[in-house]
Image (tube, rainbow, N blue to C red):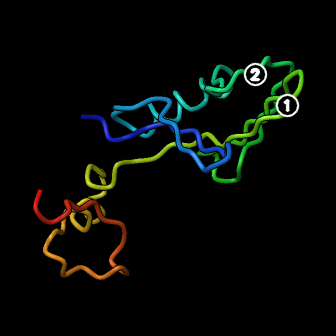
Amino acid sequence: MGSWVVIAEYYSNVYRTEFICRGLETKDQALKALRAALHTYVPSKNIVEKRRHVYRFADQESYLVVIKGKLTVWECTLRIAELVSDSTDPAVAKRAQMDDGAAEVADGPQDRMPPGY
């Protein structure tokens, strides 16, 4: 199973995250999919695009996309993310899979199963 995704984050009455592409095996694949989505991604809102501006953040793994329509301006952030428990970094993956409750918050991000599942 691929552990990389491309997501869009935006505010539309509430903060939302939308998965654009899932199941990517490598970070390079995710970056390629991200760069392809910069010019093709359209929000799930009805917007007639007149102009698109793409801004690159310094990390070069996330972008701000501003779409100007006939009546509105719509903004979102497109970025890549890795599933922590499938990380290729063994230290990150090991910390993510700790489920005995012994890990401290300072140990880093963790996936977990709620008790009873």
Q: Label 1, label 2: how many angstroms apart (C-alpha)?
A: 8 Å
Q: Residue at x 13, y 74 (%)?
A: 100
Q: Residue at x 60, y 50 (%)?
A: 15
Q: Residues within 10 Å of mark 1 (few under 14, many from 20)?
A: few
Q: Residue at x 29, y 82 (%)?
A: 104
With 92 as the anchor, is 12 left or right in this view?
right
Judge whether 115 appears above or below 87 on screen.
below
With 113 as the anchor, is 24 left or right in this view?
right
SS of the residue at dot 1? Answer: loop
Query: Residue tagged by mark 1?
Result: 72
Disc marking residue 60: none
Q: Give the residue type that dot 2 points to.
A: Ile
SS of the residue at dot 2? Answer: loop
- Farthest-out residue, front: 13
Q: Give the residue type that dot 1 points to.
A: Thr
Query: Residue tagged by mark 2?
Result: 47
With 102 as the anchor, is 29 left or right in this view?
right
